[in-house]
């Protein structure tokens, strides 16, 4: 038992509970002195739960040990530059300074949340399969629908952080991230954030959708709404600190000879993503914090009776949340550009244009947020400028598509599992892109905005821009992380089961949206005749879930029993594939110099990196 509680994650969870109760007890004691209500329907009062959640986050981090080195420095003690991680799987349950371990921690957590969010979707999708309310109440449906959205968003953010943490230092020739301790902190603060977010379900639920719009979110007597806001607020810190760390890493720690236009495309995509995370995440944190304060202290930020304006919340929220769409998809598009030349065996077409298009998407992404608000009642004269800016973002995105087509053209395509998911991602993201302009155009958006058309469009964008490339990356770099390959037959089954099912799901959503099916509702009018369509959509959703289950089985089996793969299994030019797998602890025992272009596949005699012999090896 003592050994069990010595595991950092277990110790952190125990301290989380202690901090939650201690923080709630402190506020309850203060309220007792002031003669205020001590307990509500959910035990402690709302202020006590919120303060308890804040203290629980800090106590988790302190008890877990991720802040131990900082405490030592503050006391004047010396700390080691490197930690020796435990052997085996235990190293993933504690603080590590190795970016590869942290990247895997992010990725596993993302997959766990992906499963949780997917289960939520299957439950309420089953409810929608038939007319009338089957087994969920309206409140339960709203909570599952709301948490599905936000849990999936947090999952994607953690998955992106996992890819960037693991890959970027390897791609640029760095030994680690610029700030290893901050890197570990950025991951571990996301763990209590996810717990707080999921706590909103037993504490009354969330009925506002994932956007949390006031005045509904500010007036509902639901303690779960506050935990929802607090969880997202804490998760934002992970994104901000991670973005800062990555920018410094790429700017300061590139290998010799790696000038800007010899960097891998994924590094360009990660820089663009991190710039958005660093500069825009504060806005969603601020918007949720203001609603929390309105609920706790009676402030009137979004209450018209007190001089507030609920539309202000939407401006703050979407100023982050639309650029956040590009936080979700830019790394995925970077993965597509990174892998296409490997499996097409020819140079990446328009490398410089793709690199700059990532920055262009990030820049224009800050100018389009109000297209989410055409139906909100905002000033009408703002509609047209935001319509044009939204349509403009298609230009840098189109650059990527033309580049991908140019790279595929007359290439010697190898359709291994990673390439299948790359091609699937291109097609699905194209569907999301083509269904986007009707949402950007004011006249059509006014009719489509609150329909299932938007649900289909958004899922196409997220799956094509992130989920398909995410699976491609996992299949591609799994041998580098583990020294083993994933089972190719199961990988192909995963793709061919998920892809057509997903087409049926999203095209069906857009079809019933055009016919008038509203989004975010628990039931629909039998006269509309949507029941058969919802049955088909539900079957498709379960087939997608089955394909993900096959992937998880493949993942677990391959870690132990996969085919050994120690060499350059994909014949890649990228530097991490020029050293043995799995990757050494400190990445490159010999530094390398960049001497050529990163994607000159098929060109005789071309070389990207050249390893520099150390003084020791020369003697």
Image (cartoon, grey):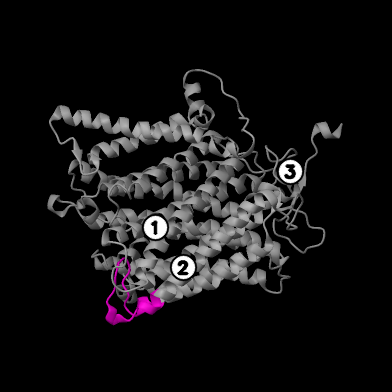
Residue mark closest to the camera, 2 vs 3: 2
Measure the alpha-carbon separation of dots 2 and 1: 14 Å
Residue mark closest to the camera, 3 vs 1: 1
Residue 529 lies in the magenta stretch: yes
The residue labelled by disc 1 is: 148
Looking at the image, which residue is at 37% across and 63% down? Answer: 124
Neighbourhood count class around disc 1 (C-alpha, 10 Å): few under 14, some 14–19, many 20 upward: many
Q: Nearer the viewer, residue 487 or 334?
A: 487
Which numbered tag is attached to residue 541? 2
Looking at the image, which residue is at 47% across and 58% down? Answer: 326
Looking at the image, which residue is at 74% across and 52% down? Answer: 565
Tell me whether the residue at label 2 lies in contact with that at label 3, contact meaning CB atoms closer than 8 angstroms: no
* Residues shaded magenta: 511-534
Count every numbered label the image shows and give the total: 3
Q: Nearer the viewer, residue 519 or 99?
A: 519
In the picture provided, is 286 more to the left or to the right than 88? Answer: left
List x then y, in percent, for residue 45: 22, 39
Measure the alpha-carbon separation of dots 2 and 3: 47 Å
Q: Nearer the viewer, residue 356 or 188?
A: 188
Q: Is residue 435 visible?
A: no
Question: Which circle's residue, 2 or 1, is located before the other in the chain?
Answer: 1
The residue labelled by disc 3 is: 592
SS category of the residue bearing label 1: helix
Measure the alpha-carbon separation of dots 3 and 1: 44 Å
List x then y, in percent, for residue 592: 74, 43
List x then y, in percent, for residue 324: 43, 55
SS category of the residue bearing label 3: strand
């Amino acid at each position: 038992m003592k050994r069990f509680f010595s595991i950092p994650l277990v110790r952190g969870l125990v301290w989380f509970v202690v901090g939650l109760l201690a923080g709630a007890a402190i506020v309850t004691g203060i309220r007792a002195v002031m003669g205020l209500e001590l307990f509500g329907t959910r035990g402690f009062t709302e202020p006590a739960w919120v303060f308890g959640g804040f203290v629980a986050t800090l106590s988790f981090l302190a008890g877990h040990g991720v802040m131990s080195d900082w405490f030592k420095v503050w006391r004047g003690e010396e700390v080691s530059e490197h930690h020796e991680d435990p052997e085996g799987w235990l190293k993933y349950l504690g603080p590590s300074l190795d970016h590869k371990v942290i990247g895997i921690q992010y990725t596993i957590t993302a997959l766990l949340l992906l499963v949780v969010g997917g289960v939520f979707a299957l439950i309420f999708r089953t409810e929608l399969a038939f007319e009338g309310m089957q087994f969920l109440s309206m409140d339960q449906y709203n909570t599952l629908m709301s948490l599905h959205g936000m849990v999936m968003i947090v999952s994607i953010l953690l998955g992106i952080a996992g890819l960037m943490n693991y890959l970027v230092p390897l791609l640029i020739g760095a030994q680690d991230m610029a700030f290893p301790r901050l890197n570990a902190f950025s991951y571990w603060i996301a763990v209590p954030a996810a717990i707080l977010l999921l706590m909103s379900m037993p504490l009354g639920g969330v009925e506002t959708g994932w956007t949390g719009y006031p005045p509904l979110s500010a007036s509902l007597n639901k303690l779960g709404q506050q935990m929802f806001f607090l969880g997202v607020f804490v998760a934002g810190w992970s994104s901000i600190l991670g973005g800062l760390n990555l920018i410094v890493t790429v700017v300061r720690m590139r290998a010799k000879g790696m000038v800007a236009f010899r960097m891998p495309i994924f590094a360009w995509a990660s820089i663009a993503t991190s710039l958005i995370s660093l500069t825009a995440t504060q806005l969603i944190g601020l918007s949720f914090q203001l609603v929390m304060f309105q609920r706790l202290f009676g402030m009137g930020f979004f209450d018209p009776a007190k001089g507030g304006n609920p539309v202000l919340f939407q401006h703050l929220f979407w100023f982050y949340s639309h650029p956040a769409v590009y936080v979700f998809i830019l790394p995925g598009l970077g993965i597509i550009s990174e892998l296409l030349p490997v499996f097409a065996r020819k140079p990446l077409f328009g490398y410089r244009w793709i690199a700059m298009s990532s920055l262009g998407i990030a820049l224009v992404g800050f100018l389009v947020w109000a297209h989410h608000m055409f139906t909100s009642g905002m000033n009408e004269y703002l509609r047209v400028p935001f319509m044009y800016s939204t349509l403009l973002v298609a230009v840098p995105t189109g650059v990527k598509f033309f580049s991908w087509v140019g790279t595929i053209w007359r290439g010697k395509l190898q359709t291994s599992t990673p390439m299948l998911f790359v091609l699937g991602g291109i097609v699905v993201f194209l569907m999301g892109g083509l269904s986007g302009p009707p949402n950007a155009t004011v006249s059509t958006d006014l009719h489509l905005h609150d329909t299932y058309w938007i649900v289909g469009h958004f899922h196409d964008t997220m799956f094509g821009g992130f989920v398909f490339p995410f699976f491609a990356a996992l299949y591609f770099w799994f041998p580098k992380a583990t020294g083993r390959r994933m089972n190719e037959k199961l990988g192909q089954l995963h793709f061919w089961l998920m892809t057509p099912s997903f087409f049926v799901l999203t095209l069906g959503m857009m079809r019933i949206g055009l016919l008038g099916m509203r989004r975010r509702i628990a039931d629909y009018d039998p006269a509309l005749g949507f029941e058969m369509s919802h049955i088909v959509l539900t079957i498709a959703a379960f087939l997608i879930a089955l394909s993900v289950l096959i992937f998880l089985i493949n993942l677990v089996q391959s870690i132990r029993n996969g085919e050994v793969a120690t060499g350059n299994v994909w014949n890649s030019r990228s530097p991490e594939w020029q050293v043995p797998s799995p990757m050494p602890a400190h990445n490159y025992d010999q530094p390398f110099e960049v001497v050529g272009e990163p994607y000159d596949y098929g060109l005789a005699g071309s070389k990207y990196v050249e390893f520099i012999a150390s003084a020791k090896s020369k003697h």
